[in-house]
Image: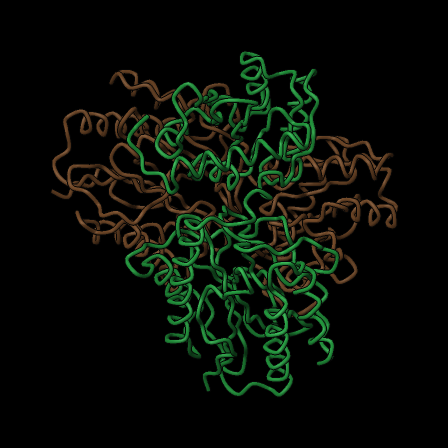
Chain colours: A green, B brown
Amino acid sequence: MPDIELNFSRAEYAERLAATRRAMETAGIELLVVSDPSNMAWLTGYDGWSFYVHQCVLVPPVGEPVWFGRGQDANGARRTAYIGEANIVGYPDHYVQSTERHPMQFLAGVLAERGWDRLPTGVELDNYWFSAAAYLALETHLPNARMKDATGLVNWQRAVKSARELDYMRAAARIVERMHARIADKVEPGLPKNELVAEIYDASLRGADGIGGDYPAIVPLLPSGADASAPHLTWDDRPMQAGAATFFEIAGVCKRYHCPLSRTVFLGKPPQYFLDAEQAVLEGMEAGLDAARPGNRCEDIAAAFFAVLAQHGIVKDNRTGYSIGLSYPPDWGERTMSLRAGDRTELQPNMTFHFMTGLWQDDWGMEITESIVITATGVECLANVPRRLLIKD
Amino acid sequence: MPDIELNFSRAEYAERLAATRRAMETAGIELLVVSDPSNMAWLTGYDGWSFYVHQCVLVPPVGEPVWFGRGQDANGARRTAYIGEANIVGYPDHYVQSTERHPMQFLAGVLAERGWDRLPTGVELDNYWFSAAAYLALETHLPNARMKDATGLVNWQRAVKSARELDYMRAAARIVERMHARIADKVEPGLPKNELVAEIYDASLRGADGIGGDYPAIVPLLPSGADASAPHLTWDDRPMQAGAATFFEIAGVCKRYHCPLSRTVFLGKPPQYFLDAEQAVLEGMEAGLDAARPGNRCEDIAAAFFAVLAQHGIVKDNRTGYSIGLSYPPDWGERTMSLRAGDRTELQPNMTFHFMTGLWQDDWGMEITESIVITATGVECLANVPRRLLIKD
């Protein structure tokens, strides 16, 4: 193994593995096939943009995890994961994007060699990186494995953050502060939107406090005017217009840990309904933050926020937040907890959320959000960016 | 439908739909469920970073395609796709990342309502965006549909580019030229790598010839020294070192159309084996480009390139290119043709490839590549960047 620098201590990786194995035992799973790159990184340190081909980390009943991926990416595993040479397994390149053979067929052979082909096997059924074809190939070539759904099994172990993880998220918070400061400085009517995006990336990558920025799991979203009625549009190269609002949904990122934060800019004089909506969101956020404390539940934050919106006559028919942390594209959420009715997960210290209080209405949108960490007694906002509509008249 | 600006004429979208239906007919498919965002965009214009939740475009036997996605993203469909209101279908937010219900269950209901629940149905089995759980949910809730594998069905229709598509790829080529010029200008020992990435993004986003840049489907890959033995590492915030090579695998992007291009920089005096490898790659590229003409096959380009490498005693045990064009993360390849032995697809005018001639050896790597378009009589390199190792001594 080359002399590599891990982002966490070996002890922390060992704890993560132990926690995962406890969850496997509870679920009756003896072999876990982890396809989610965020889970792969969290368990082993593996970091690389190789998730466009099939790959996984195996968690066997005992011993070190196994990295399995494309042969040419094995060097990436050697240089970023703590895994020893015996447990780095590459498959030949003619399995890549082939119509004749599937990498999961090769994996089945690896499992047979190691005597792991008859174990109750957990797979992440609802994950971007575990396709239907991957499942069907494993089913065909592992006739004696009893496959079980392990979607979210590792993700849930990631819910409560360690001190080091919070350090990275705080560094990401410093970065997103710089990004919003840059927007406030540069945005003006006539500026082509792509040039504003260049400024946002510049601030995000140069980073803060001597820590360089990493790439976000979601690119900047900054639709204007009626386009802001859609939450997930990216950008074009047209000039920024006076008389319109633009929301900026962006994240600072440090070592793949995210601090998302949205703010909205109005170029000109906002109409009264827009100012009213700002007022509703800010009041609602205060109510939600008041409810964000250990012992309360995810849905309590949502209920507090939605109650204030309702008083203002505003309907938001989507969740108002989700768990965040380590992430790879396409989502900076952890896909476990959601801040919405029915999510009765108890809030615990060092859980982290994007309190996603965005409004997308018929022909306008507004996002003013916070990333939060549950503390021993309440809540802390990770970033410090003025929580209000930025009006540039 | 709001007054939207499509990237292609309605006639071109109609041709794409007709070509897709011909392929469906050949495959015995009457309803196609298209989950790949690149295919969704190619068929309808739909553009947004919403692929982190389940969504698809349906191609029914007759009539307009249907956009299906999260309710809050329906406005994005209204604002980017040519689809009429009756064919934009959003599902409620409590289906998002739920452990109790799956969006494909909701889709099954939509299909039943429209009388499409008993048709031979194509699904993209091996696609990032069609998970095993999505497949199992459809199987459960569409007991009378005969599901067939349609992986790559739409992708293959995209292989030969239209004039307008080539316009966008040429604009992307102008952008990637600027990006490499910026690297040549800025790279030097001591420069923190994240700051160099900021320069690369700045050049890519500001664009060229008045056309702003779009985000790449793969973030910049720029490992140095022994890290360059791994093809898919991204970046860190350490200073660039003298005495080491760094490859830059990057793409210019215009309206989601990519022009990838890699170059390698050596800071200092390269060792002889590195210069020898450069020589082998450049000679091999000439041989490969000579073989790139209509009537030849994908594997002919690869054979010509690998033959020269072999003369120089270099083994590259992975494919040497792939089809490119419209793309969303995580891959700028089209996942159809590969330049490798066994791919006997005949080259046709206006097919486009990334001629990916990268070498990743035990403790070093080098990438000098071209994006190419097959012409009526031969080949054209899309971008014009000096094809050689950049040595900054």
Indicate the position of residue B88 as horizontal and vertical percent values.
74, 58
Vertical placement of residue A348 versus A121, above or below:
below
Q: Residue at x 51, y 80 (%)?
A: A266
Regarding residue A74, the answer to whether it shows in the image is: yes
Q: How many marks?
A: 0
Looking at the rendered image, the quarter that the C terminus of chain B falls into is top left
Indicate the position of residue B165 as horizontal and vertical percent values.
51, 49
Indicate the position of residue A54 as horizontal and vertical percent values.
53, 30
Residue B355 figure quarter = top left
Nearest the camera: A49 or B248?
A49
Side of A61 relative to B145 (left or right) = left
Q: Residue at x 28, y 45 (%)?
A: B385
Residue A151 figure quarter = top right
Side of B368 relative to B30 (left or right) = left
Nearest the camera: B51 or B150?
B51
Vertical placement of residue B356 versus B82, above or below:
above
Vertical placement of residue B49 versus A156, above or below:
below
Vertical placement of residue B57 versus B139, above or below:
below
Indicate the position of residue B277 as horizontal and vertical percent values.
23, 26
Regarding residue B326, the answer to whether it shows in the image is: no
Nearest the camera: B82 or A392?
A392
Nearest the camera: A40 or B344?
A40
Looking at the rendered image, the quarter that the N terminus of chain B falls into is bottom right
